[in-house]
Image (spheres, rainbow, N blue to C red):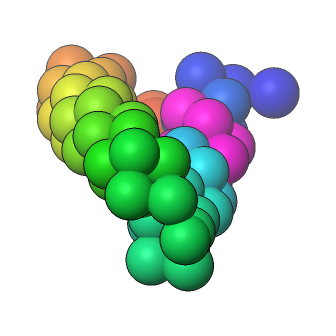
Amino acid sequence: MTIASNINQCLAAIRSIEAQLSNLALTSMDEEAKRLFHESMLEITEIKTDLENRKKVIEFEEPQYKPN
């Protein structure tokens, strides 16, 4: 498995977690839980953005990792 496919798998998992946290924040009855789920989602979003930026750097520096 290449670095690019590992990063893509990781991004897919992060996107799934982000969506689940968003859903929990919207459907939770407890206000404290809503706040915590929302804050966690924001942290995951930041991590996702960092990883997407890192992926772009890798693709730029290592042309073999660019998607076809």
- Looking at the picture, tell me which residue is in the foreground, 42 or 32: 32
Name which quarter of the figure residue 54 lies in. Answer: top left
Instruction: In the rendered view, tell whether residue 62 sits above or below residue 11.
Output: above
* Residue sitting nearer the eye, 56 or 65: 56
- Relative to the observer, which residue lies in front, 27 or 6? 27
Residue interval drawn in magenta: 7-13
Name the residue at 81% across, 27% down. Answer: 1
Q: Is residue 46 magenta?
A: no
Could you tell me which residue is drawn at 22 percent across and 36 percent down?
Answer: 46
- Residue 29 screen position, x and y as percent: 55, 71
* Magenta region, main secondary structure: helix
The answer to whether one can see residue 68 in this image is no
Give how far across and how far down residue 36 sits, in percent. 39, 40
**Is residue 11 one of those drawn in magenta?**
yes
Image coordinates for residue 66, horizontal then vertical, percent: 39, 47
Is residue 4 among what the camera can see?
yes
| 4, above or below 67, in the image | above
22 displayed left or right of 47: right
In percent of width and height, residue 55 lies at 32, 34
